[in-house]
Image (tube, helix red, strand yellow):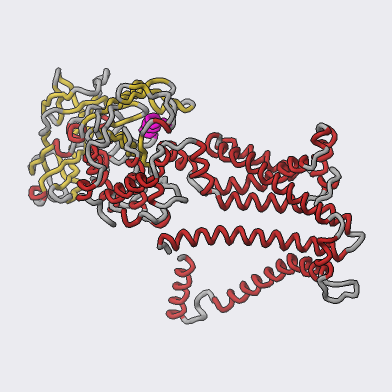
Amino acid sequence: MTQMKETSMTDTSITAGTTKGAQVELDQLVRTYGQVRALDGFSLTIAPGEFVALLGPSGCGKTTALRVLAGFEQPDSGRVMVDGNDISDVSAQKRDMGMVFQSYSLFPNMSVINNVTFGLRMRHHGRADSRTKAGQLLELVGLSDQSTKYPHQLSGGQQQRVALARALAIEPRVLLLDEPLSALDAKVRAELRDQIRTLQQRLAITTVFVTHDQEEALSMADRVCVMSRGHIEQTASPAELYARPTTAFVAQFVGVSSRVPAEIAGNEVIVFGQHCPIRTGEPLSGTGQNDALLRPEDFGVEIDPNGKGFVTHKSFLGATTRLVVQVGEISVRVDVRSDQGADIELGTHVTAKVIARDVLVAPRVAMAPVEPL
Amino acid sequence: MAAIGAMGTEMALDQILGPEASPSRGRRRPRFRTWRLVVMLIAGAYFLAPIYAGLKFALQNDANHFSFFAVKALPTEPGFGAAFWLSIRLSFVTVVLSMILMVPTTIYVHLRLPKVRRVVEFITILPIVIPPIILITGVLGSYPLWLKSSPYLLSLMYVILAMPFVYRSLDAGLSAIDLKTLVEASRSLGGSMFATMRRVILPNLRAALLSAMVLTLALVLGEFTMASLDLWETIPVWIVNFQQSDGHVTVAASMLGLIGSWVLLTLIVSLDRSQSRRSLRKTGGV
């Protein structure tokens, strides 16, 4: 696959600053379908030029939020603001938002160049100007040699790059990406992920990216907004979201977490007999039945013939090795350095310690057995 | 791929166990081929025999010798020219009205009312189950005189008769494209609904539109009951009326109508294919 041209930015008119990002504010959006509340008081503010990913499982409302922003859906209540102007009643046609769809959505009857010029022609740009600008954008996405081809003659990755060029051609105030990488194979997905991010940063365009793939969201976005049942669970930078989830849902949806029964003692939680500070987030259970949610790297283990835990599974992950340690009836996942993990065999008795600086505590739920790694 | 895999397995079995141990292609295939041939011959005879008989009769003179006299006489027969011209006008008006009515309706149903597709499909079938004679009798008894005195009343009726074919062609065409996403893509790029229809939807419905037009045309050129009861002499009515004067000429007219429809259909299909080939050649595709 042709790589995106890094150098072409300097000799084209499509450079950072020409496409100015807008501030977006989604205010208390509610959208219901029959009995289902797809958006339940959804509010989010996006800074100019920011890349925000809406992440969540199927049916959490992330696509509905994007479609409301694009103007394809009308909210039952709430407002959509762009640069301080309420555009809730403005049609999709007049919102100046470029959208890239999961299913490519190139016009099958038009060549690549005509697909890219479509938006410009709709804005009454001259034919020659439109083609010049489309050519620059195609060069930017590394497809200038494919301009006369038709969509069915391109691979999925190429089609999606044309769709990206087409969306950028109109110099949109906001770029909307609706799971644009989902239909692509793993290698192309990884390449395009980096290319989209590079392009977005260079053009400084406000971007909203919908995905159910946490790896995509964490690697591309400035901020990730985790959604569940129509509302926001947490919005934070990828690093903060991973390291300091504030709800049990986020802790378990993003990355891997083990649930360990915990006792509350004032401002502290007791896990495996250790006292740790409680991280603010979830309200605690009124019945006193709470769990601590801990990442694999929140634990440390030491080989101890008298230790209460023993290793039931072991998996080499490169720099780290992941262990499943059984302590009584509880299983926890623990990451150790691979040189340390080399000495640990299945059945080895160990002592597990919590090394996190604070611990997220959430009301207890029926515990599922820990999957092997 | 499955067939190749199965053949490969059979060949491997032949090699290991000998040809008699595997399910024998030698026993089953010829029997299958024979049946296929028999079915094709019966179907071919069923369709071609009447056409052959018609052509033979049209190309004979009264002495049963081969002759083009019926074909040559056709344009000069009384009433033929007027009937032909009326059929052409009715076809044109019917095709235009059908497209104006059905294209936006079908697109709207696909885009905005996908849940009522089955209901619309059922409604469009009604002209097939309601005999045309009932339809035209009701219309002649209730419509105003100015409309009844116009031949274009027939076009209004033909639009209803053509509805099942037009709807199905368009429905199949729309189902073959991702209509909703294409429309949303166009709208997000600033396309008005009219521009979206003209530049995105209709070009992608070309084959379905052509198919709907050809079916409508064939229906109008062959419809007899309504035209006869409304007392307008279209080609089918002229054929029936003139049959008593000269059987050879009327059969020649039927055959020419049939050949004309085939030629039209072939032209449209070739046009569609050559456009696709041209676009592939132009872009260097395969």
Question: Any magenta on residue B185?
Answer: no
- Residue A350, position as x, y percentages in the image: 11, 42
Q: Nearer the viewer, residue A297 or A72?
A: A72
Q: Is residue B51 visible?
A: yes
- Residue A198, position as x, y percentages in the image: 22, 43
Question: Any magenta on residue A68?
Answer: yes
Q: Is residue A186 visible?
A: no
Q: Main secondary structure of the magenta part?
A: helix
Q: Which residue is the extreme one toward the right? A: B244
Q: Nearer the viewer, residue B114 or B73?
A: B73
Residue A243 falls in image quadrant: top left
Does B53 sit above or below residue B133?
below
Residue A175 falls in image quadrant: top left
Q: How many numbered badges does the structure rendering display?
A: 0
Extent of the magenta region? A59-71
Say whether residue A194 is left or right of residue A275. right
Q: Quadrant of the C terminus of chain B?
A: bottom left
For image coordinates 44% across by 22% down, the residue present is: A76
- Residue B52, position as x, y percentages in the image: 77, 69
Q: Which residue is the extreme one toward the bottom? A: B18
Say whether residue A184 is left or right of residue B147. left
- Residue A128, position as x, y percentages in the image: 37, 47
For image coordinates 8% across by 40% down, the residue present is: A306
Q: Quadrant of the N terminus of chain B?
A: bottom left
For image coordinates 24% across by 33% down, the residue present is: A49
Does A328 sit above or below residue B231?
above
Residue B231 falls in image quadrant: top right
